[in-house]
Amino acid sequence: METKGVTMQHVSRPKVIIGNWKMNKTVAETRSFVSGLGLNSVVRTFQVGLAVPYTMILTAAEAARGTAISIGAQNCSDHDEGAFTGEISCHMLKDAGASFVLVGHSERRQLFHETNALVNRKVKKSIAATLKPVVCIGETEEQHLSGKIENVLHDQILHSLKGLNPSEVEHLILAYEPIWAIGTGKTATPENIQFAHAYCRKVIASEWGKDTAEHTVILYGGSVKPENAAMILEQSDVDGLLVGGASLSLESFNKILNV
Ligand code: PEP
């Protein structure tokens, strides 16, 4: 496999599909969704995760017991414990049954002003708690239109993952989510997605080595639906999907898992 500037040998990376429920679902809805999903045999083909609201982690983890579904959180604190009213630490997430956590989702970056430096602290806390970080990056529409994708991705990767060693980078998940495509119904073209993913891998290779870059799982997110999932997954540097809106209905999420 040839990406601009880095020659990649073919390695088989796991295919991962994660649903991000955002601020949705009650206890009863969580139980019924997770048990319904557990019946889907495709859960054995893809590694499947659900990033659920904090209050649903325990319920979802209990409902997922005995299945291959992983339960994760959508955010975490950059502190371990103490007087941080309203915050939840990585150890607490782990204790409740989470095995991964989204860090730096664009809604956190935009609505809650999370910086790369804060994202970096959260990534380190999650690794320390053996919670797999799913680190989200992506450009705004304005950056997209003005051709700044590479600069933005380069900065976000280097600053969000600053100080990590190659093994830590290899074991986290990177999610490329162009902000203009999240929840808007606009999707990047498969060619644009492949370009961005190959570029992310090139940045990882130049900072942490080719072997690390070849093993890092990179997901695409942004208005993924049953209708476009297959052509996105076909791209050689796309290792899976981060699905928002379409992960709220068992029917559409199951369709995505069956593409
Ligand atoms: C997301 O929340 O990460 C996301 C990609 O949302 P949507 O699929 O709704 O665009």
Image: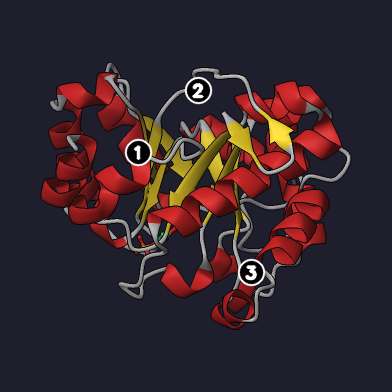
**Mark nearer the N terminus (3 vs 1):** 3
Ligand 1 rendered quadrant: bottom left
**Mark nearer the N terminus (3 vs 2):** 2
Helix, strand or loop under label 1 = loop
Q: What residue did someone put label 2 on? A: 13
Residue nearest the observer in this picture, 70 or 224: 224
Q: Pointer 3 and pointer 1: residues touching (CB < 8 Å)?
A: no
Mark-to-mark CA distance, 3 and 2: 28 Å
Q: How crowded is mark 3: few (under 14 residues within 10 Å), some or many (20 or more)?
A: some
Q: What residue did someone put label 1 on? A: 234
4 horizontally vs 164: left or right = left
Give the residue at x 17% y 34%. 258
Q: In which quarter of the image is the C terminus?
A: top left
Q: Is mark 3 within 8 Å of ligand 1?
A: no
Q: Residues within 10 Å of mark 2 (few under 14, many from 20)?
A: some
Mark-to-mark CA distance, 2 and 1: 13 Å
Examine the rendered structure and indicate whether residue 238 appears above or below residue 67.
below
| Three-letter code for the amino acid on which mark 2 is drawn | Arg
Q: Pointer 2 and pointer 1: residues touching (CB < 8 Å)?
A: no
Give the residue at x 32% y 39%. 59
Examine the rendered structure and indicate whether residue 93 appears above or below residue 114.
above
| Three-letter code for the amino acid on which mark 3 is drawn | Arg
Helix, strand or loop under label 3 = helix
Q: What residue did someone put label 3 on? A: 109
Give the residue at x 45% y 23%. 14
Q: For marks 3 and 1, give the one nearer the viewer.
A: 1
Rendered location of residue 209, percent (x, y): 80, 28
Count the numbered circles shown.
3
The answer to whether residue 26 is seen in the rendering is no
